[in-house]
Image (cartoon, rainbow, N blue to C red):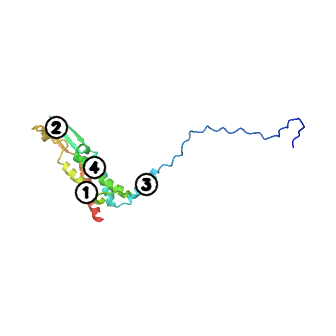
Amino acid sequence: MSDTTPGAEPTPEPTQPVEPAASTPPPAASTPPSAPGPDYAAQASQAADKLKAGNPLDLGIIGAGLVAFIASLLPFYTVSVEILGTSAGSSANAWHGFLGWFGVLAAVVAAGLLVTRLLGVSFSLPVPLRDAVLGLFAVATLCLLVALFVTPGGGCDDAGIDGLCDGIDIGRGIGYWLALLAAIAGTALSFVRRSAD
């Protein structure tokens, strides 16, 4: 009880000192919490494990498509010119002639179809997958074989100038031969794999 006299103001009871509130930063703009993103490293590891567990023939088919693509970026079509003792040469990759790029593209699509199926992606094709892969590699092989005899833009003899072509040599580079071998290997492996199923 506090001492109070009539007419006198009550004396406040002693209280504990109040500590100043800790300074808090002003609230930041309200942003919703972001959902955790996918773990790409784990997904890539799972995909690699699925591919490693695949049939060795399937891995060979995929490798053939990959080699064909890499080869398409190397010298595919070559030309060398020798006039009056001076020589010069140049080359172009597979993407400069229809038969070259179409053949390589067919091999890459075949390998891509097989990769997606091995990774468990479901899709429908008008033909069975093995037939599609074999057919695409066969088309790739056919296009690349024909590309041996067909030069993009026509050959020198098509120009109609006699004697000028004697110093011009049009050929195929390392990229062409690698792509052709990859397409043949892909066709053979696809045929064996299709027969084994």
For marks 1 and 3 on the same chain, the one whose residue lies earlier in the sequence: 3
Residue found at x 47% / y 51% = 39
User: Label 3 belongs to which residue?
Assistant: 45
User: Label 4 belongs to which residue?
Assistant: 105
Q: Is residue 82 left or right of residue 116?
A: left
Q: Nearer the viewer, residue 11 or 66?
A: 11
Is 78 situated above or below 43?
above
* Callout 3: SS: helix
User: Label 2 belongs to which residue?
Assistant: 82
The answer to whether the residue labelled 3 contacts the one labelled 4, judged by CB atoms less than 8 Å apart, is no
**Which picture quadrant has residue 49?**
bottom left
For marks 3 and 4 on the same chain, the one whose residue lies earlier in the sequence: 3
How crowded pointer 2 is (Cα within 10 Å; few <14, some 14-19, many 20+) is rated as some
The answer to whether the residue labelled 4 contacts the one labelled 1, judged by CB atoms less than 8 Å apart, is no
Return the x and y of residue 71 as percentages of the image width and height.
28, 48
The residues bearing labels 2 and 3 have C-alpha atoms spaced at a distance of: 53 Å
Q: Amino acid at mark 1?
A: Gly
User: Label 1 belongs to which residue?
Assistant: 135
Residue found at x 21% / y 43% = 78
The residues bearing labels 1 and 3 have C-alpha atoms spaced at a distance of: 31 Å
For marks 4 and 1 on the same chain, the one whose residue lies earlier in the sequence: 4
Nearest to viewer (mark 1 / mark 3) = 1
Q: Amino acid at mark 3?
A: Ser
The residues bearing labels 4 and 1 have C-alpha atoms spaced at a distance of: 13 Å
* Callout 1: SS: helix
Q: Is residue 174 visible?
A: no
Furthest residue to the front?
7
Say which quadrant the N terminus sits in: top right
Q: Which mark is residue 157?
A: none
Q: Amino acid at mark 4?
A: Leu
